[in-house]
Amino acid sequence: MPAMAADAQSAIEISNAWTPALTQTRVDTPVYMTIANRGEEPDALLRVRCPVADFAEKHVTDRGEGGLAMREVKAIAIPAANTVMLAPRGTHLMLLHTKQALQPGEAFTCSIVFQKTGAISVEVTVASGSAEGKP
């Protein structure tokens, strides 16, 4: 079931949130999800808080002369009446300095904060696949 803001009128829905399994701690790992804006107003993803990591950033993947490179962005635009996929080799969230190993099948909750919608609690599933894509 998609996660929605506490306000029943919220236009933002988040689904399919996942991260790859980790056997180590103090490493970085991506988080992917689908964010649908069913409303008539654009929004923006501003912050992420996850208890399994010390920090979280919003990243885009650039394709330049040297290959793929990630860079942090201040916000991720969520256009009105549109769906944004946070996916491997594209825009995604990055958990920095994980505090624990993440085993396949486990789940944890993150708070995803939007400019207009506010905070939405999202359950993130740990997948057995790699960061390149779920199995």
Image (cartoon, rainbow, N blue to C red):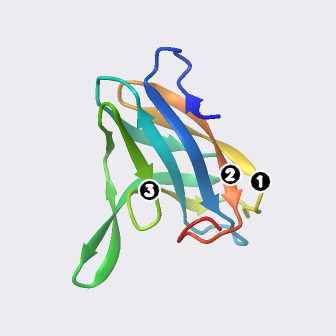
Residue at 61 percent of width and 72 percent of height = 130
Q: Is residue 10 above or below residue 114?
A: above
* Spatial CA span between label 2 and label 3: 15 Å
Q: Residue at position x 61%, y 58% from top?
A: 19
Residue 79, disc: none
Three-letter residue code for mark 1: Glu
User: In screen coordinates, is 105 left or right of 50?
Assistant: right
- Quadrant of the image occupied by residue 110: top right
Three-letter residue code for mark 2? Thr
Label 2–label 3 contact, CB within 8 A: no
Tags 1 and 2 in contact by the CB under 8 Å rule? yes
Q: Tell me the distance, in whole angstroms, between the alpha carbons under discs 3 and 1.
A: 20 Å
Where is mark 3, residue-wise?
Answer: 92
Report the amino acid beneath label 3: His
Look at 65% across and 69% down and name the residue there. 129
> Which residue is the extreme one toward the bottom?
66
Instruction: Please name the residue that numbered disc 2 is placed on.
Output: 125
Do callouts 3 and 1 mark residues in contact (Cβ within 8 Å)? no
The mark nearer the N terminus, 3 or 1, is 3
